[in-house]
Amino acid sequence: MGNQPGNRDVIDQLNKEHGETIDAFAVVGKGDRLSLVGRSDDSTIWAVWQWLNNQGVVWVMPGEHGTYVPKNQTIEIVEIHEIEAPGVNQRGGGYGLPDEDAPEGFNTKEHGVTAGQLFASRMRFNENRAIEVKDTIVALGSGHSYEHYLPASTYYKAHPEWFNLIDGKRMDGARGTQVCFTNQEAAAQVARNVEVEIRHELDRGIPIERLPVSISPNDWNAMCECDNCRKLIDKDGSASSLVTHFCNLVTAEIRKVYPKATTKFYAYDNYATPPDYAKPGPGVRPQIVFWSSAIAFAANSAQPMFSQANHRYRDGFAAWEKISEALSAHTYYAHYTWITPWPMITQMSKDIPHMAADPKFCGMYSELHLHWGTQGLNLWLYPKLLWNPKLDVKKAIKTYCQAAYGPAAIQMEAYYRTVQESMDKQGYICGYAVEIPHVLTPEVVQKVNGFISQAEGRLDQMDPDTRWRTELVCKSWRASAKFAQATRLFVHGNGPADRAKILSLVDEVKQFADSPMGKWAFEQRIATQTIDSVARSLNVDLAALPVGKQMFNDEFNMGGAIKFYAKMQGWQVGMWGYSLPVNGSGEMEIPLKAAEGHRITSARVQWSMANPQRVVGTLSVVSDDGAERVLTDDVQQMIKGVDVPAEALGGVVRLKLRLLSQYHDPSIVLTGCNIEAQVE
């Protein structure tokens, strides 16, 4: 194994074919000799693992139950000649969790690294993952890095001009703070701070070619309104030229010291579309983010990245590719909001080969939230495709299912196929939890329930590890079906009976998510956030407010929770909230009721509106006899918040919002509300 004299012919051939690729390896067997050779320590280990894989060993997931090992009586060295190199150079995704979020065994160390890190290495990731430090690609600055390299808390007092100007004021670290994108001194300071990190990594033995640096905006809109920056605002109002220009400035400074250094920035948010007034300079490699917002690419996760359904991303990627020396991609193949199945097989099997075929494409990172019970196939297949974009996906899925589920392989494969077919039929999927019922329809749930029941009937035929893996998926599916029912009721239901049913279903899902197996099924923090997003606004019963200070917060995605309490008239419900037709009006009457024997002693309501300039209206309080008292006709005041006067308080407070559209197109108006009430 490795750099041995007996392997010299294999080493020479490997160097000849892949002399520039340290991740390449060879598995060569003939007669009684087996050569396992890599161009680095890690790739030598991969050669060993590849040979084990050829014997039928499959690493399905991390942890003590995650490995399938066939029971063979003998091992024969058959004639084999495999020389492999990655289809994508930089391969990344998050398989790490802090101890407080990790399920039992996930951070247990084996061979000096945690189970999660070991699995990432077995999947041949190389971004921030390696057995040997010098073999990793260290992504400096993480992602959104302005605050990391130029923190306002350190530099603002002495150099306010280094930070972006908004509404006549230099941002001082509050939300919205970015850099002044044309300030050469700010760029030079960022470069000096980057160089400190570069020197540290070089001292650890990592070459400069494996140290890409993120010079990317903080995670909100990027903009500066100073005179110099205004000249670089793109024709459509975006900040792509600003962000590109600043990265160019920083990179030029770094490359004075380290000529081979490379940097990247996200093409994302309001700086996603290609720039009009700047293009990436030497060493600058934009990372094109498959992001769902309308000011970015309005990414449709139901369809592949480069399909007509994603023409904005497809065309944007092509335009960035044309002006860049190299580029990469950032996507979401294991989702941060969906805890149910997130079928991405069709998408991955088309996306990755398309990009890997581009000689300028240098890497990919997918956010991977670790829902092993529902998205385990995604978490396994994604790195496989990064290594081999020409992978026979159907054959790979069969291998995975046979190794993972044994006697239930056919049923599990049918389950994955069914949910994928449902996803592929969708017109548009953004990624909100309220969209889950679009994919997990009652018909799909019923069909998958049949496969899962059949799989459960085969549990007694399985060895302990296979049984555990199969139970994990079966129980995770049962929880997913309940959550799909809850979100379906949340979108289409109303009234106290539906509210009670939703809360009951969500509680059952939460109980499973909090169990030892549930913590493997779903990434704990993400699962809690997703479950709470449905339950939070329903937990405060506006029809029976208990004693104390009560807070009702509701986003109106697909109507939100307010419809369980309010009387509606004239509104059109949609993904982002409530809309009004052209010149149309809408009314919403919300009764706030104290629990029996108590009264509301204070109340305040605040509305979130997407296009307040397009409407006029009133907010009133309605008495028992139906008389209305207008609290305000100022839409901006409604957004800031309106207090209900003391004389209108009591056991019941009825609020009525009435808005009239003054716009020539249908438009989203209401996107949420906050209600505060004190009950005594």
Image (cartoon, helix red, strand yellow):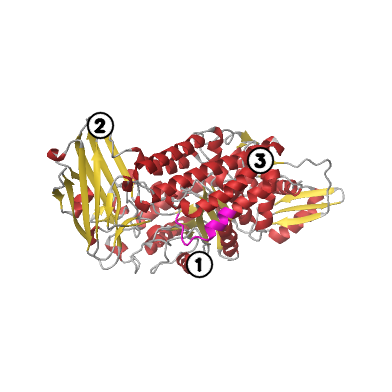
Residue 95 visible in the snapshot:
no
Disc 2 residue type? Glu
Dot 3: few (<14), some (14–19), or many (≥20) neighbours within 10 Å? few
Residue ID at (32%, 38%): 540
Residues in magenta? 418-430
Residue ID at (26%, 42%): 675
Disc 3 residue type? Gly
Residue 662 horizontal side relative to residue 528, left or right: left
In this view of the protein, which residue sits in the foreground, 7 or 276? Answer: 276
- Percent from the top left, x then y, of residue 141? 46, 49
Q: Are marks 3 and 1 in contact (CB under 8 Å)?
A: no
In terms of sequence position, does the residue under pointer 3 or pointer 2 come before the other? 3
Residue 643 horizontal side relative to residue 134, left or right: left
Residue 388 visible in the snapshot:
yes
What is the quadrant of the C terminus in the image?
A: top left
In this view of the protein, which residue sits in the foreground, 593 or 539? Answer: 593
Which residue matches tag 2? Answer: 596
In terms of sequence position, does the residue under pointer 3 or pointer 1 come before the other? 1
Dot 1: few (<14), some (14–19), or many (≥20) neighbours within 10 Å? many
Where disc 1 sits, the SS reads helix
Q: Is residue 178 magenta?
A: no
Dot 2: few (<14), some (14–19), or many (≥20) neighbours within 10 Å? few
Residue ID at (59%, 42%): 474
Which residue matches tag 3? Answer: 457
> To which quarter of the image does residue 593 belong?
top left
Q: Separation of disc 3 and disc 2 at Cα?
A: 50 Å
> To which quarter of the image does residue 614 belong?
bottom left
Which mark is drawn over residue 321? 1
Query: Which of labels 2 and 1 is toward the front?
Result: 2
Q: Separation of disc 2 and disc 1 at Cα?
A: 65 Å
Q: Is residue 429 magenta?
A: yes
Where disc 3 sits, the SS reads loop
